[in-house]
Amino acid sequence: MTITSPETASADIGVYGMGVMGSNLARNLARNGYRTAVTNRSPGRTLRLMDQHGDGSEGIFIPSETTEDFVKSLEKPRVAIIMVQAGEATDWVIEQLADHMDEGDIIVDCGNSLFTDTIRREKWVRERGMHFVGAGVSGGEEGALWGPSIMPGGTEESYKRLGPMFETISAHVDGEPCCTHVGADGAGHFVKMVHNGIEYADMQVIAEAYDVLRRGMGATPSELADIFDEWNAGELNSYLIEITAQVLRHKDASTGEPLVDMIVDQASQKGTGKWTVQTALDLAVPVTAIAEATFARGASSQTTQREAAQHMEGHAQELKVEQADHDSFVEDVRRALFASKIIAYSQGFDEIAQGAHAYNWTIDKGSVARIWRAGCIIRATFLSDIGQAYDEDPDLPLLMAAEPFASRIEECIPSLRKIVALAATHGIPTPVFSSCLAYFDTVRADRLPAALIQGQRDFFGAHTYRRVDREGTFHTRWADEGKPEEQWD
């Protein structure tokens, strides 16, 4: 087919970018009754969508070959979604659209953009009288097609136009859409960034549980798949546990071996985990589980260093759990996994809270938890409990210290200690298990050795310290005889 100039105002919404995610999101919109304008920088991808899905069976698509025609086809106030590679490509498309759009029109970036870029872009577009919305979209290709979790930022005014459409095409739980207005300017992409950081921690700690189980029991991947299936029927029920069982059960077609054994043990990353950790450092929020998961991916890909370390003994014992102890061992790993997952989610919500404070966003953390219950990669049963906890106390200082999590973590911590100790003794790397235990012990400690650090800092840099027995800021004159103390305020 050929692309002809579309009729003016013939589309309810448009999608610029016909890669897999953009095409699937456009198909989702069309299937839900929205006349959907589609275009791409190279017309070939637009033609492919029309050839494969433009027969009307999935709804109405209105193709355009140029940006001008694409914008012309949108009904006012126009809504144009961008689904292109983050970075310079996104900036280029925004400028192209803005050149043809009018005051009150809305540009929506549904890609994985860094939230600070979104803040900059929102300001640029707003100064031209239009709206810019950075919307996090989670769920991968299938989510985009059948119902993702959507996290829009931007103005409340833009959400009045955009929100009903996004709520319709999002995943739903008990009739409730997995979409809500997150907050101003970059809030949507910020929350999506933290979502991805939690995803890193969740995936890594599941992998650590698999590794400990396999080494300890000598079980096959298929046998471990049965364990993960059983776990998915309980409090660990989640998308990532579900697909873990499927991956472990799958056999390689060419060798007949478990596919997991044929995959190179190097985990890739696209940067959102790194952004989460970098931002947490800027905000002084200890997201240790996310950080260790991000570093673990990096370490897995350091082949030269890993090869150089192969000759090092390590002085570790081989982990071998007796058959009679298998059930209790599996339960210990399950409990350690549950506790670690809750700690990782708690850290992620801490970052959301601190980010909201730093950037003056009003983010409803209970609503965020609810829109993550379906459609997204970290969807899990216990997100309903997280939502309820924040509904009861929006200013909750520490999620894992609230019920029902506090009681469950208390029950699970002995197992986490046991698994971390076993792993350490037997030379099994468990960075997220270990960091979650260390974090738990840090926040619950009545006194930390940070007092010594402050003393050291004051000694070499006159950085001062506070005292436990009286108000004020103090400095010890360490170089003077008698080391006298003076109060600075």
Image: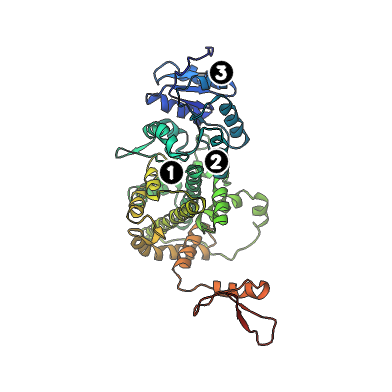
Query: What amino acid does circle 3 point to?
Result: Glu
| Residue under label 3 | 65
Local packing at callout 3 (Cα closer than 10 Å; few below 14, some 14-19, many 20+) is many
Q: Residue at x 45, y 27 (%)?
A: 77
- Rendered position, 392 above or below 121: below
* Percent coordinates x, y for residue 331 in the rendering: 37, 58
* Percent coordinates x, y for residue 367 in the rendering: 37, 46
Local packing at callout 2 (Cα closer than 10 Å; few below 14, some 14-19, many 20+) is many
User: How far apart are the two marked residues, 3 and 1, measured between alpha carbons?
Assistant: 33 Å
Q: Quadrant of residue 376?
A: top left
Q: Which mark is residue 148?
A: none
| Residue under label 2 | 118
Report the mark closest to the observer, 3 or 1: 1
Helix, strand, or loop for circle 3? loop
Query: What amino acid does circle 2 point to?
Result: Thr
* Percent coordinates x, y for residue 184 in the rendering: 47, 43
| Residue under label 1 | 182
Name the N-terminal-most of marks 3 and 1: 3
Name the N-terminal-most of marks 2 and 3: 3
- Rendered position, 165 above or below 49: below
Query: What amino acid does circle 1 point to?
Result: Val
Instruction: From the viewer's perspective, tell me whether residue 214 is left or right of residue 294.
Output: left
Nearer-the-camera pick, 458 or 76: 76
